Image: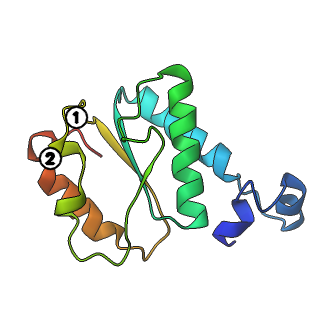
Amino acid sequence: MSPARVSRTRTTRAAIAATRASIATDDVQGAAGAEWAKTQGKTKAYVLDDTRLYGAGLAKAWALARQQDRPRAVVSPNKTSESFDAKATDYNAALWPRRSRRPVPTSVYIGSITGQNTGKLWKDLQAALPDYHDHVR
């Protein structure tokens, strides 16, 4: 199942059903993730995406769903998701949370596909928020 097959802008539930797989669209996956964060008591989130169809769709859906019950839950500057460059070798200079007067996030949501350098992004993010290492997941 390709990421494009679950994009709300690229397919319909009928097309997904035709594949004989039960795969939720981006908006449903994002909402489920946002609901889980809510049940974990996460009140502020920094949302990132890899600019690709699947990652950006998930991140936007997550942010919109989370804001429905808590309007100030997303602390990313644009209130949905911030895109990251998958080809970057160092994300320390680009990490927004540590340089802002806005609330420090209690969670981070990264909408991305495998192979978009998210491991390095995650490592740099944890280094940027050392006091919150146990809270930012």
Residue under numbered circle 2: 129
Residue closer to the observer: 83 or 23:
83
Q: Residue at x 43, y 42 (%)?
A: 78
Contact, CB < 8 Å: mark 2 with mark 1?
yes
Q: Quadrant of residue 124?
A: bottom left
Instruction: Please indicate whether residue 20 sits to the left or right of residue 128 in the image.
Output: right
Instruction: Please indicate whether residue 78 sits to the left or right of residue 20 in the image.
Output: left
Quote the CA–CA distance across marks 2 and 1: 9 Å
The answer to whether one can see residue 133 in this image is no
Residue under numbered circle 1: 104
Residue closer to the observer: 35 or 27:
27
Image location (x, y in percent) of residue 33: 51, 42
Q: Residue at x 61, y 47 (%)?
A: 29
Residue type, mark 1 in image:
Val
Q: Residue at x 74, y 53 (%)?
A: 8
How many marks the image carries: the answer is: 2
The answer to whether one can see residue 112 in this image is yes
User: On screen, 59 above or below 65?
Assistant: below
Residue type, mark 2 in image:
Leu
User: On screen, 63 above or below 25?
Assistant: above
Instruction: Please indicate whether residue 55 sits to the left or right of residue 13 in the image.
Output: left
Q: Quadrant of residue 52?
A: bottom right
Q: Quadrant of the N terminus?
A: bottom right
Image location (x, y in percent) of residue 28: 66, 44
Looking at marks 2 and 1 on the same chain, the residue that comes earlier in the sequence is marked by 1
Q: Residue at x 51, y 50 (%)?
A: 59
